[in-house]
Amino acid sequence: MIELLRQHRWILDFLDIFLVSVITYRLLRIIKGTKAAQMLIGLGMLLLASLASRHLELFTIDWLVQSFWAQIVIAMVVLFQPEIRRALAHIGEAQFLSTFTKAEELKSLEEVVRAAVSLANRKIGGLIVIERDTSLKDFVEVGTLLDAKVSKELLLSIFHPTSPIHDGAVIIKGNRIAAAGCFLPITLRSEVDKALGTRHRAGIGLTEETDAVAIIVSEELGAISVAIGGKLENKMDMGTLRDLLTDLFTVKQGKK
């Protein structure tokens, strides 16, 4: 078999290009919307500066850039340490060819929508995070592990003001509530509206670093917002929230 493949070298070349393309695509999806993506843009600009300095014979700039490149491996490990850890965990867990969402997961999305609307009507704050491709294992581990079926009633009981874990986030994986009372990273971006509370900043912060979807219910306004890719969608009602989640978690996601 191996000898046959060697005789048809184009098959191996095609396989090589295909695997590199898949891995690159998945890595880009992992870092999309994160600080690592911004850093990669900066490194790209630095590479352009290096090429330009050599072409224009700007010796001082070229020397500075070359000195930096000598330490680039160590710098990347330090700067991208969280993303590297999550990427390695993701590669070990994710199914690269998964496309269709199970019917149970779609039913869970409906339970999430109903719970969010009910929380908003009662002006009870809540933060519900739904995992997508990037693993949220690190955040699950610091919360209260549940591994329970997603239901409106359970979500309402978790976020009830008398619950000891109502201030944290609920993380959903598939059709299961993985954990509750989870602590999420807070966004530090200066352009984020200062009127937003901790829940909104946590939802934005998490979606800056992962591809998760965060549904935030405001305790003061009784309004529903959704954070995706570090951006916040406000004034969501039952219909728009259901449509958004359906678009994100159906077969369309696998075709992107």
Image (cartoon, rainbow, N blue to C red):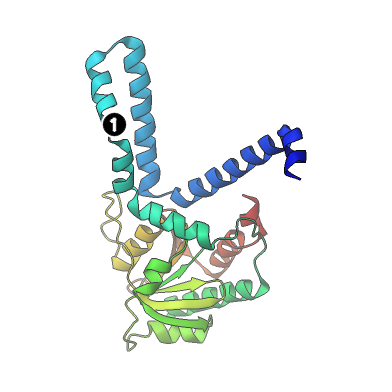
- Residue 208: x and y, percent? 39, 54
Quick one: label 1, few (<14), some, or many (20+) residues within 10 Å?
Answer: few
Q: What residue do we see at 24% from left, 20% from top?
A: 63
Q: Is residue 97 visible?
A: yes
Find residue 10 and report its image quarter: top right
x, y percent for residue 9:
71, 33
Which quarter of the figure has residue 4?
top right
Relative depth, front residue between 79 and 181: 79
Residue tagged 1: 70
Query: Relative to residue 147, is residue 199 depicted above or below?
Result: above
- Tell me where residue 19 appears, x and y as whole percent: 61, 44
Residue located at (42% from left, 87% from top): 157
Depicted 142 relative to depicted 152: above or below = above
> Is 231 or 105 nearer to us in this picture?
105
Residue located 53% across and 77% down the image: 176
- Lateral position of residue 142 relative to residue 16, left or right: left
Asked whether residue 232 appears in the rendered view, the answer is no
Q: Residue at x 74, y 40 (%)?
A: 3
User: Where residue 251 sits: x, y (%)?
Assistant: 67, 59
Amino acid type, label 1: Ala
How many marks the image carries: the answer is 1
Name the element at disc 1.
loop
Judge left or right: residue 5 versus residue 143. Answer: right
